Amino acid sequence: MAWSPDPSDYDPMCRSCHGSSERADYGKGYRNDADRARELRREWKRRQYARQVAAEAGRAAYRARKRAERARRVERQANPDNQTEN
């Protein structure tokens, strides 16, 4: 049924009954609130996992940079006469 500006075209219903009647009207293609909530939780978990992977990659890159800096510092301390000005 199309939208109507006349209030007499509508039946007063509580929220639960209204949702039930709409689900019955839409049939099999309608996704209820529980399905939508489940989908949102899955999407949230996917995003959380992506953030976790990105954070771990960032931490790994940071640790690699620190190891390289430490190796250069140890090398400079071992051979102080071979230092070059940057």
Image (cartoon, grey):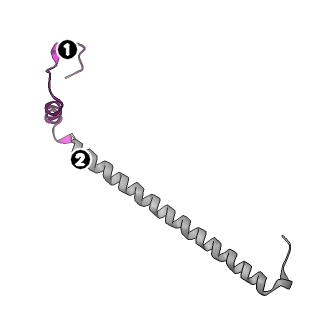
Mark 1 belongs to which amino acid?
Pro
Q: In the rendered view, would you say 71 is above or below 15?
A: below
Res. 56 mark? none
Q: Farthest residue toward the bottom?
A: 78
Mark 2 belongs to which amino acid?
Asp
Say which label, 1 or 2, has the lower sequence index: 1
Q: What residue lies at 78% left-to-right and 81% top-to-bottom? A: 76
Res. 35 mark? 2
**Quadrant position of the N terminus in the picture:** top left
- Left/right of residue 81 with respect to residue 32 in the rendered view: right
Q: What residue lies at 23% left-to-right and 42% top-to-bottom? A: 33
- Left/right of residue 39 with respect to residue 84 in the rendered view: left
**Callout 2: helix, strand or loop?**
helix
The answer to which image quadrant residue 15 occupies is: top left
User: Residue 67: where, in percent of width, then height?
Assistant: 64, 76
* Mark 2 Cα-neighbour bin, 10 Å: few <14, some 14–19, many ≥20: few
What segment carries the magenta color? 2-29
- Left/right of residue 58 with respect to residue 9 in the rendered view: right
Q: Which of 75 and 28 is in front in this view?
A: 75
Res. 7 mark? 1
Q: In the rendered view, would you say 36 is above or below 19?
A: below
**Magenta stretch encompasses residue 3:** yes
